[in-house]
Image (cartoon, grey):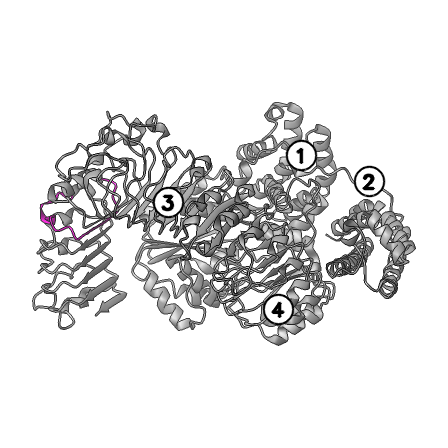
Amino acid sequence: MAEAIAFDLAVDLITKLSSFTLSQIGLWWNVKDDLDDLKSTVSTIKAVLLDAEERSVTSHLVKDWLEKLRDVLYDADDLLDDFSTEALRKDLLGGNKLTKEVRLFFSSSNQFAYGLKMGRKMKAIKARLSSIESEARVFNLVERDRPMETSFMTKKRQLTHSFKDKIIGRDDDKAALLKLVLEFESEETVYIIPIVGFGGLGKTALAQFVYNDEMVKNHFELMMWVCVSDVFDVKIIVENIIKSATGQAPDQNLEMDQLQKQLRENIGGKKYLLVLDDIWNEEWEKWVSLKELLVGGARGSRIIVTTRSSKVAKITSKCQPYVLKGLSNNDAWFLFKEIAFEQRSADSTDLGFVEIGKLILKRCCGVPLVIRTIASTLSFKETKNEWLSFKDNELARISQNEGEILPTLKLSYDHLSSHLKHCFAYCRLYPKDHKIDIRTLVQFWIAQGFVKQLNPSQSLEEIGFGYFKDLVERSFFQEVEGDLMEEMRCKMHDLMHDLAESVAGMESSIIDSNKIASDAGENCRHISINPSLIPLFKGKKLRTLLRSPYIETLNLSEETWDFIIANCRCLRVLELNVLNFKTISPSIYKLKHLRYLDLSWNSNIKILPKSICKIQNLLALKLDACYELQELPKKIEKLVNLTHLPCRSCFGLTHMPRGIGKLTSLETLSLFVVDKDGSHGGADLSELRLINNLRGELRIENLGFVKNAKEKFMAANLKEKQHLRSLVLLWSGGNDDDDDEKSLEDLQPHPNLKELWIGGWRGDAQFPSWLSLLTNLVKITIGGSNFKHHPSFAQLPCLKELSIADCTEVEYMDDNSPKGSQGEPQSFFPSLKHLWLYNCRNMKSWWRRTKPIDDDSNKDDTTVMGTTTMAFPCLSSLFIQDCPLTSMPLYPSLDDKLQLRNTSSRPLKQTMKMNTTSTTPSSLTSSLPLSKLKIFHVDNIEGFDTHMADECLQHLTGLKTLEIRDCKEVDLESLQWEPIKNLSELLIGNIPQLVSLPRGLQHLVQLKTLKIRECNGLRSLFPVFQHLTFLEKFEVSNCKELELSAAGIQIFQDHTSLCSLSLENIPKCRHLPEWLQHLTNLQKLYLI
């Protein structure tokens, strides 16, 4: 990659050296002639770099020459950055009179001395470049122009295939594997299926195809996926299996025997599917040590192994491996055509393009990754001549040995623009199979100067994200997840990672051993490292130091801090998160080139050194989850380039420093804390006035303590913050002056806002009028506030989540009647998916009403006409607790979760009485209302009796989880349980009439979990329990009359699937019951 870096560095240097500002400062410091000579030399060298780039492929001498050139250009860039930094520091000290444009470049309060020092350095670099220029003449390099690189912003191209990992041509392979996974009868309890094939064929994709099949999901009790990759460390693999099984990583301090115990607890007796992806280990002993830990599953368990090595397949399994081959000609052409002609469908039938395309396709050997990558590259070439040139020149030079596809992939890399080459190669710092945080990656690119701001109307982050999308379009990344950039993750294919490692060369390294730390060269510029190895690293030209993601939390010593500051003066990126240090070296200011500093998740940091404000180049200072941090540096305004200041969960912050409002380039400021009593001399809200580029979330705390609230709220200028996605306004006590009652009106946000949270508001009982203007809102949360009613949220077209909690004064949700101004049903909460109503004890009706509602639950009518015809059109989950709602919109479309606690049963009853001929859209009720509901919790519901409970069960045919508590009027024995025969979890709590388990439970043949709590009338589990032989988990607690340990009780003798048993506070169970001996698969036993 030396040639790409050299070209980009040369372009940047020429741009800086051509500036009028630098020319003026050159005169000031008497180094203008040196600067002009430097520019001339760099320009001459740049002219031959394209020729050198091509010749470096076959000439080691040219390649070495390029690497020497790259190093000296790096040093020149550091020198000019030194100029810029010094100038900025002196400007902030008020030490010069230059114009602002000039001051942003180079100056010094001691111009003469500084000029001499810089002049000497300049001459040394000039001499090195002159020598390199002379060497170039020996190679007879020819001047050539690089073709104009088209910015991604100018391409008329839509992202379609790239964000969807389509699997093409593998249906037969999937069917064959499904037979092995689901049908094949093996003598072994745990049957191992190896999938073998060289890189890029799609082994992992095929395994995922099978893993995600619905039949497979229903067949296995437990499914786990672990990527093994290069390092076969049994302890790490076991940790990852446990993490996949439980969703939670085990304690990193556990010894191997403790991990084995946890593993047995999680997989023992269960029919499981485990995928061990990308195994390279060929040592039989290591494999056996892992296999022995995995044999405890139930018969029918399967392990799928993916590997490139037939030897790995032989040592992992006795069976024949499934050998994956390349795609058929038809499937390969279909995939190629879908991508290469995606935006030019007419060309897909042009015989000229088709003929060339099929000739190119032959060289792809049916390998999906190569087809995607080459087709993606060709999709940006729009003429037949360009396709022919690619086929006859670049592709013709590549050998066609099966399995050697890296050179072919490199062709697509060679066709990237130089800045994209930098960006891709930088990803070599991530371990294989690592989930890459895309926003962080883009910020790394920006810190390194890879992102070019050609369009001033766009932020660097937006441009950098465009670079990422460009690389995705060309198939350099895969498995992209998430919608918003701040939430997006992706991965690199192993072969792409190999390519990144290859093109990065010695410039980047992952340092995870003493040897690698010692061997890393002086010219290594970027590392990801285990922090304990930092003192072993010898290089002094580092630009990136990342904390290796897969290490235990360490305590970073003062000695390590000192080493970094003494030896890593060229750093642009420094990531030291989750390292438990308490103090930061005050000498950190010596890292003056630093652009990105991540100190997040160091919960013991209380104070940041004042000197941190001298790092004026800093673009990102990350402080998330520094729980004990008490304050930000007082002179933070000196960080004039700061763009990102994330400080979520910094609970110890008491105020914001004065002057923070001068940081007008900020795009991230996740927290602004109002100084409660002014004792800290903190900033007030007016400092937010000019910080209008904020993105993501802004959380403002202690608003209740603001003095002159109307004035300060308006001064915050929230309505001008058009890029803000989420706004959190929290009062947390404070004054209740009458003058401030209506000041919430003055906190009006911009209408682009997506999420709004208002908490603890104690002022005016009226909601601000601006809510109706926020038509882009997706989520609203209102908590602990004293509004008496809310405006109509029903017309907000994008609203998906609505949460109202602890609003004890609210009386109704909507001032309109249901047939007032709601319009057609389709326009009533058209997007709402999730609704939470909690502890709103005065809210008896959704709508404002003039007459009291008759609480007779046997009546279906209400005093508000039309209530039964108004329904949420697409609500998926509903939670109501401690709200006496007797009248509200109905909810027949619920398909996820319904939780009702301490509320009225009337709306539920009305919902169930809806039918397909009601006035709601037919799409709501394609079958019985609530028939698609998966989870139903009912707890102390007024009017919920046996008849109503039985009616519910007739509707809830898709139910998977049922919790029924404190329903004193319900007789479970009288219920018809057959309609919910697919139930997998049942909880019964405080049902006084329950004496024995309802006989209807024997119909629940899918029941896996049964929990019984506070049923003091329960005496026996007979005669039903012995039919529940599929139970895996049984819990019973606080049942005073239940007899379990008497002689002769053998109800558990057939429960061989039971893995977990909990008996808590069962007075009549005085000793261990005899029937425990029958529970041969029991893994967890709790007797309290």
Distance of label 3 from label 1 (alpha carbons): 49 Å
Residue drawn at the location 39% of the way across and 50% of the way down: 761
Distance of label 1 from label 4 (alpha carbons): 44 Å
Q: Nearer the viewer, residue 552 or 245?
A: 552
Residue drawn at the location 29% of the way across and 33% of the way down: 871
For label 4, the crowd category at 10 Å Cα-Cα, with few meaning under 14, some 14 to 19 and many 20 or more, is: some
Q: Is residue 192 above or below residue 974?
A: below
- The amino acid on which the numbered mark 2 sits, given as a three-letter code, is Asp
- In the rendered image, which residue does mark 4 sit on? 609
Q: Nearer the viewer, mark 3 or mark 2?
A: 2
Q: Is residue 925 left or right of residue 86?
A: left
- Quarter location, residue 756: top left
Q: Is residue 767 above or below residue 625?
A: above
Q: Which residues are magenta?
A: 957-977
- The amino acid on which the numbered mark 1 sits, given as a three-letter code, is Thr
Q: Position of residue 999 (x, y in %)?
A: 10, 49
- In the rendered image, which residue does mark 3 sit on? 179
Say what secondary structure mark 1 lies in.
Answer: helix
